[in-house]
Amino acid sequence: MNFNIKNPIIAAIALCTTLAIGQTTEEEEERLNGGTITVVKPYDPTISDAFKVKSNPSFNDTTKVKKKPVTYSIFSVPVASTFTPAKAGLSRLKPTQKAKYFKNYARLGLGNYLNILGEFAANFEIDRDSDVGVFFNHNSSQGGISEVIADDSFSDTSLDVSYGKRTRDMNWGITAGARHQAANLYGAYEFTPNSLTEDSDVGFNYLSYGLAGKATFFDSVLKEIDVNLRGTTSSFDASEMRFSAAPQLGFDIMETEVALGVEVDYLSGSFDTQGLFPVLEEYSYLKAGLNPAINLYGDNYKVKLGATVNYLDDSEASESDVFIYPDIIASYILVEEKFIPYVTIGGGLDMNSLQQFADENVFLAPAVNVIPTNRLLDAQLGFKGKLSESFGYQLFGGYRIEENRPFFTKDTGAGFTNGPVQPYHSGNVFYTQYGDLNTVLYGATLSFDVHTAFHLTLNATGFTYDVTNGDAFDNIPSHLADFTADLVANYEINEKWHVGATLYYVGERAAFRESTGFEALDSFVDLNLDVNYKINPKLTAFLRAQNLTGGNYEYYLDYPVQDLQIMGGAVYKFDF
């Protein structure tokens, strides 16, 4: 067993202890409401969104002005009436009727490329302290991307069912779900020996399923526990199972808040079909970890001082190791709400998985290398605040050191094959190759909120990369952008009309192809508009225009996305 405590981490801890600033503690998890369960489906950017990047920006700025989401809200917000009839008047005005809440909704949309969107969310109250929630989502397209020869259709369908219960001592809930992804490997290399035709069968699919449970305890040393069991299979005979459990404990010692996180994460998988690059047929990892921390508070500061200890066992290689990382977060209020410096110094052992890779880039080879990533250092220094009630900001810089960081690379296809040509023989699949990556990042976030009707958020981040120990792919940061930016704006014109806009910019990227080397992917700007019209309290019509400016850009090498997409539809809210 090797003990792996890196010098940069020790240096980072020493640096942090010289800073007299505090931490922004993590927000408390929302407790289950026994009266109702709101079905929430977080956005998960995948191939399902018409083969185009649409990652909603995520901000860690507690001082920024919140914006309304661009998507239609399930529930209407009631406006309280404070009207008092005039004493001298003989006629009395009726008080404004409050908007009605609805527990369920259905959404249906249809667009060009024969894109279909369907959603259904329902909440069933069993009694005053327990509920059942159901969420169904379907997104599909018949394809038709310009200059693509093979079939480029896809579909993504998921179903989740949850149950929640509230008692005097605890809240708990369980969720079961499944997801089916089907797509086609249409992005062939231009000069591949096995060219694709209209009749080429390049279809494949992934099926994932899972069961999860979470419990939150009151007045107990054990604060909460999360348990997850997930499985993934593919039409190329790949399979993966993952189990994780994460109890969280908390208590006070001499009036100091102490927290202890415990983690167990087991991952195993196998590949019955190999691609052009041979990989291990089986993999199995066990990670166990402890995360002790103390939280210190003052009038102007918050500090979290902790560390993460991870034990990793690689059963296939018969190897084990221990990793230690800092876990330090601090912030200090120099000027109330206007200027708050902060620092975070952390790291971690990231358990990469087949499901994670398929969620990010579904066009994978039948078998890929699955190796954990060692994030030795992940530090950020910045400041944030509000210059006015309508203007929030955040400026930051960071540095990250990663060992065994995965990169997506591509091949040129098979020159000679044993037996019939397979769907992955045309230079149309991605492999995972690993290298060590040092990243310098810097960026800013600006948010505007004008009279509660107009909201705008701008986020921009620049990156500088240094890749080592990636000789197999020429130390190229394959498919990593040097600059990204996104802008989200929405405007509530009146109670009937609502307009939203999102704009994404992704800078130039280098992509690596085996045998040919480096290739450049152009930058692109992707603009989307969303218009909603509220016909009545239950029915809302929507019209979406996506990729107004990007054209058939390539987010991944050889895979152009759908051009301008127009979709219209409606959302219907109701109660059973």
Image (cartoon, helix red, strand yellow):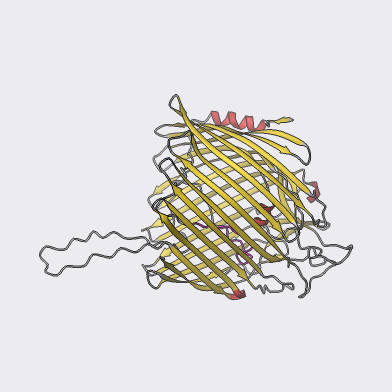
In-image side of 214 versus 469 (left or right): left
Residue 547 image point, x, y percent:
58, 68
The answer to whether residue 211 is magenta is no
Highlighted range, magenta: 40-55
Q: Quadrant of the C terminus?
A: bottom left
Asked if one can make out residue 249 in the rendered structure from this viewpoint, the answer is yes
Q: Position of residue 392 (x, y in %)?
A: 44, 50
Which secondary structure class fits the magenta region best? loop
Does 5 sit above or below residue 184? above
Residue 42 in view (yes/no): no
Relative to the observer, which residue lies in front, 99 or 71? 99
Look at 63% across and 49% down and name the residue there.
Answer: 463
Picture coordinates of residue 46, whole percent (x, y):
62, 60
* Residue closest to the far top: 254
Q: Quadrant of residue 555?
A: bottom right
Up/down of 221 relative to 204, above or below: above
Residue lying farthest to the left in this orientation: 88
Residue 51 sits inside the magenta stretch = yes
Image coords of residue 214 (percent x, y): 52, 46
